[in-house]
Image: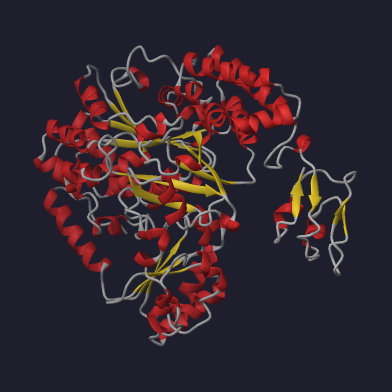
Amino acid sequence: MPEARMNCLADLRGRQERARVAFYGPKVRLSVGVGTCGLANGAGDVLEALRDEVARRGLDFTVRATACVGLCEMEPLVDVLAPGLPRVFYHKVDPARARDLVAGLAKGLHHGDWALMRADQDKLLVDLPRSLTGSLNGLAAVPTFEEIPFYRHQMKVALRNCGFIDPLDVEEYLATGGYSALAKAMESMPPEQIIETIERSGLRGRGGGGFPTGKKWRACREAHGEPKYVLCNGDEGDPGAFMDRSIMEGNPHAVLEGMAIAAYAIGASYGYIYVRREYPLAVDHLRRAILQAEQAGLLGINILGRGFDFTVRISRGAGAFVCGESTALMASIEGQAGEPRAKHIHTSEKGVFGRPTTLNNVETWANVPVIINQGADWFAAIGTKASKGTKVFSVVGKARTTGLVEVPMGMTLREIVFDIAGGVAGGRQFKAVQTGGPSGGCLGEDQLDLPVDFDALTAAGSMMGSGGLIVMDDRTCMVEVARYFTNFLRRESCGKCTACREGVLRMYELLEKITAGQGTTADVDLLEEVSRYVADNSICGLGKSAPNPTLSTLKHFRGEYLAHVTEHRCPAGVCKALTKFTILTASCKACGKCSKACPTEAISGGAKKVPALIDQAKCVRCGSCREVCPFDAVGTE
């Protein structure tokens, strides 16, 4: 049961201290990440097995549910913290191995000599020093958190508590210093000083626009009209993006604390968190966090006895990508159709319900408490001259290790893709990386040393966006990539303005024509012309950025477009109308994998030392044979 409501700052500090003592106690602590990615991989069963085995053995261990720690493809992950020993992870744990883990800990071995070190751990131990893997005895058998290459180059700020605390227990957030920034702001920082601190920190919006956060707050504070609103954008509609979802699931109180600080600074009384309907777990965690914070006197009426009221509610979106745009989001909260409007009047003056409004995304709000506690200079010292702090990225696609990363602004794409994500899966050649989600641009190998910040990516024809990062290998057709994302964007267009409604559709039709082998060089030129028109004449950010995938691929991979229209071939062997798969008999080892994978039985031979042969009449150009061949013996014509 929650403790009594805190009526003053002294109550908060006392409760934080009690929570800290309990949290960092002498018990062995086993944590399981049961965020969306963990649950999808069976983490719920692992958590139940750990609890059952600990209870069966009568052990005085703490077994906790946390959230994602970023290494999503290695879920289920079990995090082990024991007094006096480093923090370590076990990955891909199933219920049986979870029970073995408890048995080993019960004997005092702590990560000792069991069959948990498997070949699949090679992916986790990329470039790990041999000394850490040479012995299966004792602690050396398992790398610590800091030694895992995926984490070694990261800096956790927005993700600081994700996977470390139980997101459904406000006491654990308090134990790690939670709500101390709100208390500091209300006790010793006048609103003007809070806004000045955010301005000096250089924090820019992490939702894609990169607008200075402090400037937004100041404009809203100075605007006339009551009440004022603080909004959080948790819509996150980009395919392959899950940064905000992970924060809402793993550290919801950080978002609430950031919003409360802003509300106090600008004089707002009400807040909304706009979350897409596809995020049920995030919604559940936010609702519980709001209730806990209200019961503790950290949200709601008369917060911490200081006469400040701030009420937060959740508004659920219906999955429209355009509702990630600020004015469309506000229209949706109001119960209207989610359509953007021209910003002749800024939302800081006339936003939701026609009142002054401050809107930032989830990651931006999660940074605010750290800036207040650590100071503007601390945050401003991280990153580049114009892009301060860290940025969270979801690394997906053909990366060797996919997941969620947080790095200082200014780190290069090469460092993220190769040092953190381990390079390209399957040892294939790197081809491109797309940053910024479906509205982002695709950058080639010659752009890998580009620093990741707002201005450098924009100048290169891409964008920071909300933080999606898709790695592509040499079997990716860049024309098809442009077609795929343009199809997504034309479906998601609200249709309000002609430039986006008709222009993106025309772009899609031209890309369809080119990938179908019916395009001409005139079509390529027309595609570029229409794309530039859409970018220049659309009303909102979705339309203005919709041509980015096409324009960037035309800029960096124009040769692929020309190969499609002049040579009638797809260099990557992806576009079915322009591709013919053949067996390279000199390379074929007759392993039989291609014939087993073929859905139309178009492959004969391939076993008993007989090289495979593809019947072109039966082949549907699906590429399954090429995907499974371990010898690169499937070529294209």
Residue 327, position as x, y percentages in the image: 41, 22
Q: 213 or 504: which is nearer to us?
A: 504
Which quadrant of the figure contains the N terminus?
Answer: bottom left
The residue located at (67%, 17%) in the rendering is 522
Position of 352 with respect to 189 (left or right) is right
x then y, percent, for residue 483: 64, 31
For this orientation, the residue located farthest to the front is 586
Task: Find residue 32 and report its horizontal and vertical position in percent.
Answer: 44, 65
Q: Nearer the viewer, residue 166 or 408?
A: 408
Which residue is pictured at 48% across the width and 43% down the height? 469
Tell me which corner region of the image, top left, top right, bottom left or bottom right, holds residue 464. top left
> For this view, does 234 lie left or right of residue 218?
right
Task: Please say which color scheme the image uses.
Answer: secondary structure
**Quick check: 636 above or below 113?**
above
| Relative side of 494 to 2, left or right | right
Q: Is residue 310 above or below residue 502?
A: below
**Residue 285, visible in the rendered structure:** no
Q: In the picture shown, does residue 125 fall above or below 176?
A: below
The picture places residue 20, in percent across and down from the top left corner, at 22, 63
Quarter-of-image position of residue 381: top left
